C-alpha cells in the first residue's frame, strides 16, 4: 500500500504546485520526492512481474519436457 501512498503524495504535491501558480513540467516533477518514490515502486513492480513471468515459463518448459518424455 506504500505505492498508493506515493501516488497520493505526488498528487498532493502536484495540486499544491499548480495552486501556487507554478507551471508543472516533467523536469520539476522528476525532482519531487514523491515522484522518485513512485518510480522506485514502479521499478520493483516491473522486476517482480518479470521474475514471476520467467518463473512461469520455466515451469511450462519442465511440464513440456515431461510431456514429451511420457509421449515417447
Image: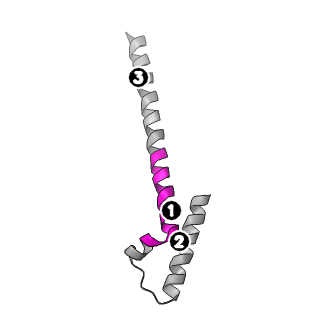
Residue drawn at x 53%, y 81% is 15
Vertical placement of 5 versus 17: above or below?
Answer: above
Vertical placement of 56 versus 29: above or below?
Answer: above
- On the image, numbered disc 3 is attached to which residue? 64
Q: Are marks 2 and 1 in contact (CB under 8 Å)?
A: yes
Per the image, label 1 sits on a secondary structure element best described as helix
For the N terminus, which image quadrant?
A: bottom right
Magenta stretch: give its range: 30-48
**Pointer 1 or 3: first along the chain:** 1
Q: Judge whether residue 46 is colored magenta.
A: yes
Q: Main secondary structure of the magenta part?
A: helix
Per the image, label 3 sits on a secondary structure element best described as helix
Residue drawn at x 40%, y 19% is 65
- On the image, numbered disc 2 is attached to which residue? 10
Name the spot of residue 5 as percent of width and height, x first: 60, 65
**Pointer 3 or 2: first along the chain:** 2
**Pointer 2 or 1: first along the chain:** 2
Amino acid at each position: 500500500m506504500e505505492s498508493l501512498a506515493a501516488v497520493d503524495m505526488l498528487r498532493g504535491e502536484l495540486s499544491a504546485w499548480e495552486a501556487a501558480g507554478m507551471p508543472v513540467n516533467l523536469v520539476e516533477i522528476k525532482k519531487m520526492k514523491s515522484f522518485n518514490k513512485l518510480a522506485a515502486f514502479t521499478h520493483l513492480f516491473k522486476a517482480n512481474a518479470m521474475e514471476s513471468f520467467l518463473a512461469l515459463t520455466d515451469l511450462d518448459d519442465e511440464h513440456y519436457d515431461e510431456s514429451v518424455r511420457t509421449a515417447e
